[in-house]
Image (cartoon, rainbow, N blue to C red):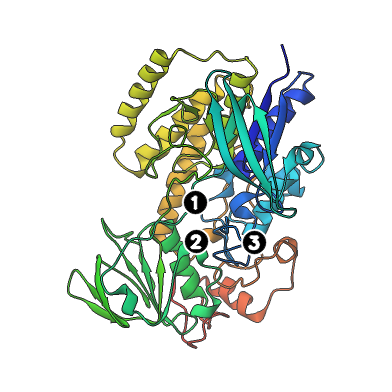
Amino acid sequence: MSRQRIAIIGAGPSGIAALRAFESAERAGEDIPEVVAYEKQDDWGGQWNYDWRSGIDQYGEPVHSSMYRNLWSNGPKEALEFAEYTFDEHFGRPISSYPPREVLWDYIDGRVRTTNVKDKVRFSTAVRWVEHHEKRDIFTVTVEDLKSHRTTSSEFDRVIVATGHFSFPHVPEFQGIETFPGTLHHAHDFRGAEKLADQRVLLIGASYSAEDIGVQAFKMGARSVTMSYRSGPMGYDWPEGMEELPLLERFEGTTAHFSNGEIREFDAVILCTGYLHKYPFLPSDLALQSGNNIYPAGLYRGVVWQGNPKVYYLGAQDQWFTFNMFDAQAWYVRDLIMGRVELPTAAERAEHLQEWHQRFQEVGGDADAVRFQAEYIRDLIEATDYPMFDLDEVVRIFLAWKEDKKKNILTYRDKPYRSVMTGSLAAEHHTTWLQELDDSLERYLSTPEETDVEKAVRGAGTPEVPAPGNVRGEETPTA
């Protein structure tokens, strides 16, 4: 029997997880398939590979990353830590629970930095089309080398779709929005809050993008920050200068009218309205079509495309867990491909899908959703040799994190958590998040001399001095 060829589309955290899964089996002495990964960016890391560009990249392709300067993890790193490569192992010491983007990219890159995994990735290469040939039961994958402009096609036995689903923005229509004269863009194109200093900012949306960009804008000195919600408010104890209002009804130039009758003037609008599942390189019979939820229809065990079980999706769910969930999925897909796990019949898969879909329908809120995803991951890990970890403790961390944000949306990133993998308590970052304006790896790992501002903040317990980025010259709110 000839050696299988596997195409991995995308080399972000999900694609790297797939590469790592095969590399782990190879390291254990097993024969693995021939694996080729395609990544349209010049380096791997997916969303964590920051690009200052927005809209179109240097090759004329849609920019993939939705990252921005000064983005810090908005959830404890202890909830996303790899079970087989810890933060302590990578950095040689405990670090804080909420690292910035560059630090997380370094961690993702670090666990495969000393392997030959990167040799399997064709960078600056966009997948243009995937075609399944039913009679021969193989796939033709057509790609373009973005540097040489050369188009080629290769045949594969299976395809792993690991492109993520936070790159194609959902942009709804709002009455009169074409009359708004200020800056207007989607969160996907947001690259930093510095330019929002002294601006009256409207964020349309009530999820993580609106929350994080909102506090980032406040930190960088926005004059006011308003968030407009459709279903319900986030409900945090917002500091003075931040507010939530119900659904935006219409614009009249710089004036926005809300459904409760409130009227506000704005200088900048950011659409935090979510993303679409979009796979332009797949025919419709292979392409997942789903809203952003924790159990997309049509994926057996969240990864196997029911319409063609030789197509797999990694990271297609809405996510509480992230990196370690991608690992659990990748290890399971690897074992299916290598015959270490038996794939049930189509009827059995359909029954399993229905059972888990029913469980998904019974999820009643965030706490239920976190527990559901933990049980989903447990189900995958129990079928493979990926290291099991204390999923119940991770659930507890997630729920504690939500409480931290309710207590103070501006200071929750300063709290340390204990690693589920090593038991070590996270370090306290040398600078509070509200005062830290440098998100570089070098600054983060340094031990700078404490400034007078930082001493005052640490001594008082609450900031009583102007925040460095607050150009209004006002005092920052107390905790």
Asked if one can make out residue 401 in the rendered structure from this viewpoint, the answer is: yes
Dot 2 amino acid type: His
**In this rendering, is residue 307 above or below 170?**
above
Residue 117: percent from the left, percent from the top?
A: 76, 37
Dot 3 amino acid type: His
Image side of residue 231 versus residue 322, left or right: left
Q: Secondary structure at mark 3?
A: loop
Residue 177: percent from the left, percent from the top?
A: 32, 73
Image side of residue 195 versus residue 248, left or right: right
Between the residue at mark 1 and the residue at mark 3, the CA separation in whole angstroms equals 29 Å
Q: Which residue is mark 1?
A: 166
Q: Secondary structure at mark 1?
A: loop
Question: Do residues under tags 1 and 3 come within 8 Å of each other at their CB atoms?
Answer: no
**In this rendering, is residue 206 above or below 339?**
below
Residue at the image position 42 percent from the left and 45 percent from the top: 399
Residue at the image position 46 percent from the left and 45 percent from the top: 398
Between the residue at mark 2 and the residue at mark 1, the CA separation in whole angstroms equals 8 Å
Q: Which residue is mark 2?
A: 188
Which quarter shows the N terminus?
top right
